[in-house]
Image (cartoon, helix red, strand yellow):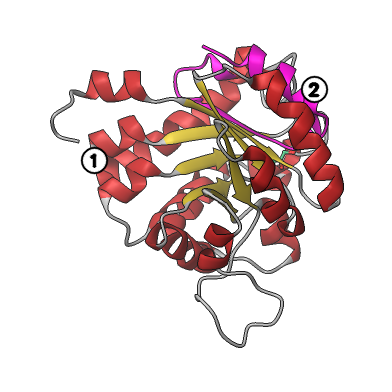
Amino acid sequence: MAEYTLKEIIMQRKRIIAGNFKMNKTASEAVEYAKAFLPLVKGIDDVEIVLCPPSTCLQPMSVVLEGSAVGLGAQNLYWKDSGAFTGEISAPMLLDAGCGYVIIGHSERRAYFGETDQTVNEKVKAALGHGLTPIICVGEVLEERESGETEAVVDRQVRGGLAGLSSDQVASLVIAYEPVWAIGTGKTATPQMAQEVHHFIRGIVAADFGAEAAAAVRIQYGGSMKADNVAELISQPDIDGGLVGGACLTPDGFATLITNGRP
Ligand code: 13P
């Protein structure tokens, strides 16, 4: 990366908007979605677009997305490649199913499935080791924000998730700041509130992995992002995209959101 100036690295940072289907859609519904979605986003090359459906949808969806600019991501993985880990899916399996990305440490997984900063870190290493781009989720719950702990929580999650990685690895991955109180609630962080935390996260990356990694790493906002608030959020200097839940579930709605989020 050394051949580029920091300004050039920042200029090259491409927006990335990912749709997290969560536990919604059967494989046939996801295939129909992909068929309807592709023509709506055809020609968009200034935003990286990723769809993250449930794992049963990955392989059939990859067939539809093949040859398009739309990427495919999983919502979780396990860090071992294979073995006696009932119910889990590994990085090689995700690659085989056509994935290029994987969401790691979503707040729902931290809250309901016991994920910790340490398991997030294991998963991030496994993803990177197999060439998958991790989308690492961080964010505080309401009580933490109200008691002034947002920075401490985000600092611990970011440092925990990135522990032991190289600067080049950090430069290549995606961090999603999702304030938990804004997820699925219709309460969006104001662009200023989100920008503050995004700037803070980029500062952590700069301190631990250097100015170039901080200039390159992409930081998405997530939490009630919609077609009518994406433009204001994404125009903040440290907001490089979105991780979208509810508003990604219809092809039309998500395509409109992406179009409104173009530079
Ligand atoms: P909503 O967009 O439904 O608030 O969900 C955000 C989210 O959790 C994406 O991962």
Q: Which residue is mark 2?
A: 253
Residue drawn where x is 47% and y is 41% of the image: 174
Q: Quadrant of residue 105?
A: bottom right
Count all numbered tags in the image, as a single digit: 2
Question: Looking at the figure, which quarter contains the N terminus?
Answer: top left
**Membership of 246 in magenta stretch:** yes
- Report whether residue 52 is seen: no
**60 over 190 or under it: above or below:** below
- Secondary element type, mark 2: helix
Residue 217 vs 13, above or below: the answer is: below
Residue indicated by mark 1: 210
Indicate whether 103 appears above or below 7. below
Q: In the shown orientation, is residue 215 left or right of residue 124?
A: left
Task: Give the residues in magenta.
Answer: 234-263
Q: Is residue 211 left or right of residue 52?
A: left
Q: Position of residue 10 (x, y in %)?
A: 32, 22
Instruction: Decide whether residue 174 is among the magenta residues.
Output: no
Ligand 1, by image quadrant, is top right
| Label pair 1/2, CB-CB below 8 angstroms | no
Q: Residue at x 50, y 20 (%)?
A: 45
Q: Mark 1 is on which residue type?
A: Gly
Q: Is residue 94 left or right of residue 165?
A: right
Q: Could you tell me which residue is drawn at 72 percent across and 60 percent down?
A: 111
Considering the numbered disc 1 on the image, is that residue within a helix, a strand or a loop? loop
Q: Does label 2 point to a residue whose CB lies under 8 Å from ligand 1?
A: no
x then y, percent, for residue 20: 70, 42
Relative image position of residue 11 (x, y in whole percent): 33, 18
Q: Residue at x 80, y 21 (%)?
A: 252
The nearer-to-camera label among 1 and 2 is 2
Please name whichever residue, 203 or 245, is drawn nearer the observer in this view of the structure: 245
